[in-house]
Image: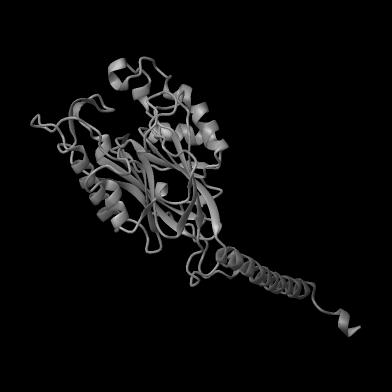
């Protein structure tokens, strides 16, 4: 019969073409459906818990009574990592700013938290850690890449010169004395919230606490921290992508109500709001600094300054004196959806241009 004389090769090509058309149509339909679902997710607020924790890195290994009143060691950093891991997990924190740590130890903690956790690398200079602030995050919740797999901005900048942060008896990580080099560095990491696409530039800060200036005068600590805060604000304006909003978070060594113009008022003047100034505070009247002991009556010195798109619901602290001389601060925020002009990402077959092959972090 004439209908049966078609060449086998031609039949195979026709079948392959039909399958390709079917797959493209099917994936387009799936994208249309997922786009609607994605759009619904983007139109709803997301809830996440962020944290900040001064980990009292190796200073807590060998406390002496004249350090901060503690006459015992609370263990090496490696010994304390399981405690830190368990408290971060139980608090359901998905991104945390760490102070008094470094690139190496932040990596240890991220590894302990599990395979989905990542840590920033901004505090490195000439192949060695020089900053005492690093971010960690759960990559199942936050991505360090944009929607096309390109790395988002991260790095380090100076908030003061080494000479400005001078303390005669201070010992740096490299053994040198006299200049608080670590606290003159601030690290940053832009992250994208996977659930709705919002981007935030997390700026991890540890403001100065010291005694003397180079000429022997007593340091005006509040004025110096204000100088650092203003430099952080001016630097952060130029570091992230156009869609990223700043989150300045860390150990500010400043309490609400401290006299004069403080770093807190400077961050608020820049349009950011202090987590302790809104929402519910589950530990009112207590300090985030514990001196290696139980709760202390005072106000927190660890803060998160957030943009308007992050509404604080609850701020809390977890007292873990066996892990650090600071409490873990947790902030549950409701993240508003991003602007509607940011469309969902199409599937790979109908996306314009080749898809990057690097893993999403």
Side of 48 where 103 appears, left or right: left
Quadrant placement of the N terminus: bottom right
Q: Give the image location of residue 237, x and y in percent.
A: 30, 58
**Residue 310 or 86: which is nearer the viewer?**
310
Horizontal and vertical percent position of residue 196: 54, 60
Residue 193 percent across, percent down from the top left: 50, 55
Task: Tell me if 312 is positioned left or right of 62 in this view.
Answer: right
Residue 18 appears in view: yes
Q: Is residue 146 above or below residue 263?
A: below
Specify the quadrant of the image occupied by residue 225: top left
Identify the residue at image location x=32%, y=54%: 268
Most distant residue in the right direction: 1
Q: Nearer the viewer, residue 237 or 211?
A: 211
Tell me the residue at 23%/50% (across/down): 231
> Looking at the picture, does residue 123 appear above or below residue 202?
above
Residue at image x 43%, y 33%?
327
- Asked if residue 228 lies left or right of residue 202, the reply is left
Q: Is residue 359 visible to us here?
A: no
């Amino acid at each position: 019969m004439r209908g049966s004389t078609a060449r086998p090769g031609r039949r195979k090509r026709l079948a392959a073409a039909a399958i390709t058309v079917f797959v493209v149509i099917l994936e387009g339909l799936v994208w249309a459906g997922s786009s609607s679902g994605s759009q619904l997710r983007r139109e709803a607020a997301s809830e996440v818990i962020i944290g900040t924790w001064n980990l009292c890195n190796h200073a807590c290994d060998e406390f002496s009574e004249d350090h901060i009143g503690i006459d015992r060691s609370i263990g090496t950093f490696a010994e304390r990592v399981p405690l830190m891991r368990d408290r971060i997990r139980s608090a359901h924190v998905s991104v945390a700013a760490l102070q008094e740590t470094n690139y190496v130890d932040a990596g240890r903690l991220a590894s302990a938290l599990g395979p989905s956790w990542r840590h920033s690398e901004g505090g490195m200079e000439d192949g060695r850690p020089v900053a005492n602030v690093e971010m960690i995050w759960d990559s199942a919740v936050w991505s360090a890449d944009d929607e096309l797999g390109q790395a988002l901005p991260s790095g380090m900048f100076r908030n003061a010169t080494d000479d400005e942060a001078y303390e005669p008896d201070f010992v740096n990580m490299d053994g040198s004395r006299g200049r608080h080099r670590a606290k003159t560095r601030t690290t940053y990491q832009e992250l994208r919230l996977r659930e709705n696409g919002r981007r935030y530039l997390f700026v991890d800060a540890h403001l100065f606490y010291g005694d003397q200036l180079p000429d022997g005068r007593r340091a005006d600590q509040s004025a110096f921290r204000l100088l650092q805060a203003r430099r952080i604000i001016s630097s952060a304006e130029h570091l992230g992508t156009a869609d990223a909003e700043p989150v300045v978070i860390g150990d500010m060594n400043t309490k609400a109500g401290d006299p004069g113009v403080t770093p807190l008022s400077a961050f608020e003047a820049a349009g950011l709001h202090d987590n302790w100034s809104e929402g519910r505070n589950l530990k009112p009247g207590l300090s985030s600094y514990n001196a290696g002991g139980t709760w202390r009556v005072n106000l927190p010195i660890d803060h998160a300054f957030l943009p308007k798109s992050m509404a604080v619901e609850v701020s809390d602290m977890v007292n873990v004196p066996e892990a650090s001389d600071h409490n873990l601060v947790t902030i549950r925020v409701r993240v508003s959806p991003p602007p509607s002009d940011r469309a969902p990402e199409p599937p790979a077959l109908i996306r314009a241009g080749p898809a990057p092959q690097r893993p999403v972090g």
